[in-house]
Amino acid sequence: MSTESENIEELVNRRYAHGFVTDIASEGLPPGLNEDVVRAISALKEEPEFMLEWRLRAYRQWLEMVEPEWAHVHYPRIDYNSISYYSAPKSDKDRPKSLDEVDPKLLETYDKLGIPLHERARLAGVAVDAVFDSVSVATTFKKKLSEAGVIFCSFSEAVKNHPELVRKYLGTVVPQRDNFFAALNSAVFSDGSFVYIPKGVRCPMELSTYFRINAANTGQFERTLIVADEGSHVSYLEGCTAPMRDENQLHAAVVELVALKDAEIKYSTVQNWYPGDENGVGGIYNFVTKRGDCRGANSKISWTQVETGSAITWKYPSCILRGNNSVGEFYSVAVANNYQQADTGTKMIHIGRNTRSTIVSKGISAGHAQNAYRGLVRVMPQAQGARNHTQCDSLLIGKECGAHTFPYMEIKNPSARIEHEATTSKISADQLFYCRQRGISEEDAVNMIVNGFCKEVFNELPMEFAVEAQALLNVSLEGAVG
Amino acid sequence: MLDIKDLQARIGETEILRGLTLNVKAGEVHAIMGPNGSGKSTLAQVVAGHEDYEVTGGSVQFKGKDLLELAPEERAREGIFLGFQYPVEIPGVNNAYLLKAAVNAKRQHQGLDEIDAFEFLKLAREKMALLEMDPKFLNRGVNEGFSGGEKKRNEILQMAMLEPDLAILDETDSGLDIDALKAVANGVNALRSPDRAIILVTHYQRLLDYIEPDFVHVLSAGRIIRSGDKSLALELEKKGYEWVREAANA
Amino acid sequence: MSEPAFNHEALLQAVRDLPVDSLTASRRDAANLFVARGFPTVRDEDWKYTDLSNVIEISQQSLQVASAPAAIDEDLLRQTQANLDAHWIVIANGKVLEQHSPGTNIPGVQSGSLQKTDLAIDEPLADLNLALLRDGLKLDICAEFAPDKPLGLLFIDTVENAVASTHARVNISLERNANARIVEAHVSSGPAQHYSNCVLHLDLAEGAVCEYLRLQDRATNHSQTARLNVSLKRDSSLHHGSFDLGGRLTRNDLNVAIQGRNATARFNGLYIVADGQHVDNHTKVDHLVGPAISQQEYRGVLSGHCRAVWNGKAIVHKGADGTDATQANHNLLLSDAAEIDAKPELEIDADDVKCAHGTTVGQLDERALFYLRARGISKPDAKRILTRAFAATIVNTSPISEAHEFLGGQVEERLRTIDDGRQS
C-alpha cells in the first residue's frame, strides 16, 4: 500500500518534466528513403550480406503496402521522405568502453531524465542498455550476465557477434511484410536490444532498456529480439521518455519474443514519449508491433504495459500460443489526456492444446482524448481446451473525451471457454466528496481512485517500475479534473 | 463549538433549509429528528460542505471560524466528520490506504509528522476490535461489496481513527440489525468526551436507546420546530411527528 | 477474395422494367446509389464474418430469369397463421396479399403506401431493396389501437424451380402514447434458391410502447437479410425479441436510435444454428440523448458445421448523460465444426454513463451437469435439459407472452433435430 501516490508532492509541476533538448550535434543521414538509404544504414552498421538482403526485401515489400486506416486514430499523413533514417551521437566513432568514458553531457541528459544510470543499475541490480538516439552507448553488468551465459547486447553487436542466432530468429515472429510499420522498421531499423537466455537459465537480474528520441526529424526504429531457450526465464523492462518538441516524430518499433519449451518471458513497458502539449501540438506517433511466440510447450509470455505518453499510440502486444499448455497474458493501463489518441490492445491466438490467456485492460480518458481498446481472441479448430478471460474497463474523466471498446472473438473449437467483460465508469462526484470529507484533497483523491482502478495491472509490474508508473499516471492526469 | 444561525440552503430550485438555528457545545450530544424530507441530511451535507447545496443565507461558525468559507477537505482537517447515510464504494482503493491518507492529511494540517505504519496498524486493529470488525476489512476496497451494516461500521471506524471534534452521523442506524446497532453505538459512546460534540441525525428513536442525547431537536420543513431533552424523543415515538407539527402551528 | 460478378446493367434494366408508379423515381435513385457501391464484402468491417457470395449469385440469377412469381404455399400460410394468433398482414413474394390481410383494416391502424420521404436509409442492401421494391406498406398506429391480439406481419416467400429474390419494405409508426404488440414472421418454401431482403422501419413517438416479436423460420435453402431501424422518442419503450431458427444465411441488422429522454430499448434474441446454417445478428444502439436505457441479451446454440456472428454495438454520443447500456451475449458450442464470431463494441463519448458488456463462449456448466447426473439423470439427458434451460431464458423473457408456448415448441423442435444429428 505504501507505493501509492508517494511521490505526488514532487509531481506538482504541470509541464512535461522530461522536455528539453540535449545539445549534442548529431551525425546522421539526410532525410529521405530509398534503396540507397537502406544500403547506407546497413553499411554504416557494417552488417553482413544477409542483413542487407533482409532489409532490402522488407523495403521492397513496404513500397507495395498501404498505411493502415482502421485504427480509431486520426493524424495528418506522414511524409516518409521528410524523415532522417539514421542519426548517431558524435562520439559514436570511438565507443566508450565503460561509463567513465561516456560523454558527460550524455550522462547529464540521463540524470535530467531521472535515470541515474550507474546508481540505479547498481542499486537495483539492473543491467541497463541505454539507447541514445540510435546507437547503444553503455552496457553494464555484462560480465555477470555472461557468466550465466546470457547474451544482452545491442542489436548491432548481436548481428556482428551472434549472426547465427539473429539469422535463426529475426522476423520469425513479426515477418517483414506483417504490416506497414513493421515492414518500414525491418528496412531501416537502426538498433535496439538483443537478448538470448540459454537453456535452463534463469536470468540473474531484470534486464532494462531506456529509449530516447533526440535529434529533430529523426525517426526512431528500434528492433528488439528476445529468445528464451528451453526452460529459461527472463524479465525485461522497457521504459521511454522523450524531449519536448513541436514537430511530430514517428516511432515505429518492432519487438519479437520467442519462448521455447518451458520458457517464460515477462516484458514490462512504461511508455512516456512526449504526448504533445495541452492543445495537441507536437508529440510522438508511436506505431509499434510487439508480438510473442510461445513456440514450445508450457511456455509463457506476459506483457505488461503502462502507456501514458505519445500523441498517438497504435500498439497491440500479442501472443501466439503455439505450444501446448502455453500461457499468454496482457496487462495494460493506457492513459490518454488532452488531445492524445490511444488505440491499443492485444491479440491472443490459441493454436496449441490447453492454451490459456488473460487480458486485463484499463483505459483512462481525460480532456479531449480518445482511448480505444482493440483486441482479438482467436481459438483455432485444433486448440482443444483453450481458455480466455478478458476484463476491459474504461474510466472517463470529463465530458469531451471518448472511450471505445472493440473486442473480437473468433472461436472455432467447441471446448473453448471464453469470457469477456467490459465496464465503463467515471470518477463520481460522490467518491470525490467522500474523500474530501475525510480530509483528502481533490487531486490526491483523483490519483487515489485512478491508481485503485489500475491496481490489477500495477500488481504485475516489478516494484520499482510500479512506483514509476504510478507517478507517471499522476503527472499525466494533472489538471484533468476540476 | 458549532454555531448555526438562520441557515438557508437549497439544491437547484428547491429550498430545503429555511432559517435553521442550532448551537452545539463541546461535550454535548444532539439528536436531530424529523420526518423524511424535513432537511436532516441536507443539514449534515451543508455542514460538511457538499457543493450541490447552495447556501443562500445565514452563517455557520465552527470553533470561531467561518465554516462556509472552507473547502470540504479543510473542514474535515479542522475536525468535522460526517458519517454518510450512503457511504460510497471506491473500487480498488483499499480501506487502510484511504484511512492512512486521511489520518495523515489531518496530522499534516495540525503540523504533526505522518503516522508510522506500525503505529497506524496497531491503532486501526484496536479500533476495529472495539467495533467487532474483522481486520481483513483493512485490505478490502473502500466499501466495495460491503453489506449495509459493514459500511456503517466502517464509517464509525473512520471516525474513531480521525478523532474529530464534531461528528455528524447521518442515519447511521438505518439498515442495521440489533447487533450491528449495538456495536456502532459502542463505538460512538467510546468517543464521547468533554472535548467532542456529536450530532445524531436519525428518523427513529431506537438509536437513542443506545446513545443517550443531551438534546433532541425536531426538524420540519427546514426549521427546528421544537427542542427538548431525551424525553422529547420518547414522546415523538408515541405521538408521531404530526403531533409536534400541530403543536408548532398552534 | 473475389465475389461473384454482379451485373449492374441488368439491375438498372430490371428497375426500368418495373411498372411506373409513385416510387419510380426513388427506385431509380436507389439503383444508382447501389450501383455506385455494390454489395458489401468481407472487407467491410460490418460484413467481416458474413460472405454474401451466394446472395449475390441468387440476386444475379433472379434478375435474368424473368419468370412469373410462384403461387403462394397456402399450407405454410395457414399453418403459420394457426400457430400464432394475430391480425395478419401477409406479404407474399414481396406483394401485400389483400385477401389475407385483415390487419390493414382494424380500428386504430391506418395503412397506406410509402412516400419518398419514408425511404432514405444509407446502406447498400437498403438501396437494393428500394430499387427492386414492388410494393411497400406504411402503417400508422393510433393511440386508440387496442386489439385483442397482436398485429402480425407475415413475410412468406414461395419458389418453384426458378431462383428468386424478393424485396419488401414496411414502415410502422406508433403515434404518441400508442401501445402496440407486433409479430413479424418470415417463412418460405420451395426447392429453388431464394433471397429475401427486408427493410423495416419502426417509429415510436413520445410515450409509445411497443412489444415486437420477430421469428425467422425460413427453409434451410433460403437466405435472408433483414434490417429494422427503430427510432425512439421521449418516454417511449421498445421490447424486441428475435428468434432465428431456419434459413441458410441470415443476417439481421437491428438499429435503434434513442432520440428522446427516458426511452427504453430492451432486446433479446435466440439463434439456434445447425449444420449448413449461418446466422449473423448485428445490433446497434445510438444513445443520442440521456437519460435512457438499452439492454440486450442474445444467446446462441451452435451445432454441426455452422457459423454464427454476433456484433453488438452501443454508441453513447456526446451529451447523452445518464445512459445505461448493457449488452450480453452467450454462446453454446456443441460441435467441432461450429464457429462463433462475437464482437461486443462500446463507443462512448459522454462521461456520466453506465455501460457494460459480457460475452461468453463455452459449453454447458460442468457442475450443473454433474449435479443432474448425481440425481440419476443420464449424461445425454442432462445435456438436453441444460441446453433447453439455456435457450428458455430468452423464450421466457421475450415479448408477446401468448407466443411463448409456440416459441418454446419451435425451439424444442430445433434442439431435437440437433440432438438427433449429434447422436447419429
Image (cartoon, rainbow, N blue to C red):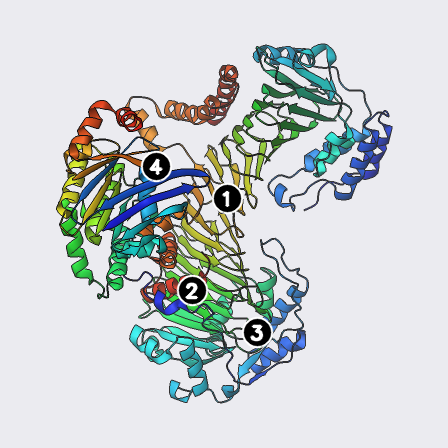
What element does badge 3 sit on?
A: helix
- Mark 2 and mark 3 on one chain: yes
- Mark 2 and mark 1 on one chain: yes
Q: Residue at x 37, y 66 (%)?
A: A468
Residue identifier under label 3: A50
**Crowding near the residue tagged with mark 2, few <14, some 14–19, many ≥20 C-alpha atoms within 10 Å:** many
- Three-letter code, disc 1: Met
Hey, which quadrant is residue A216 in on the image? Answer: bottom right
Q: Which mark is residue A83?
A: none
Hey, which quadrant is residue A25 in on the image? Answer: bottom right
Left or right: residue A142 versus residue C143 is: left
Q: Are marks 3 and 1 in contact (CB under 8 Å)?
A: no
Q: Which mark is residue A475?
A: 2
- Three-letter code, disc 4: Gly
**Crowding near the residue tagged with mark 4, few <14, some 14–19, many ≥20 C-alpha atoms within 10 Å:** many
Residue identifier under label 4: B222
- Mark 4 and mark 2 on one chain: no
Which sits earlier in the primary sequence, circle 3 or circle 1? 3
Q: Nearer the viewer, mark 4 or mark 1?
A: 4
Q: CA distance from mark 2 to mark 3?
A: 45 Å
Which sits earlier in the primary sequence, circle 2 or circle 1? 1
Q: Chain of mark 1?
A: A
Front-lying residue, B21 or C244: B21
Q: Position of residue C76 (x, y in %)?
A: 64, 14
- Three-letter code, disc 2: Val
**Crowding near the residue tagged with mark 1, few <14, some 14–19, many ≥20 C-alpha atoms within 10 Å:** many
Q: Chain of mark 4?
A: B
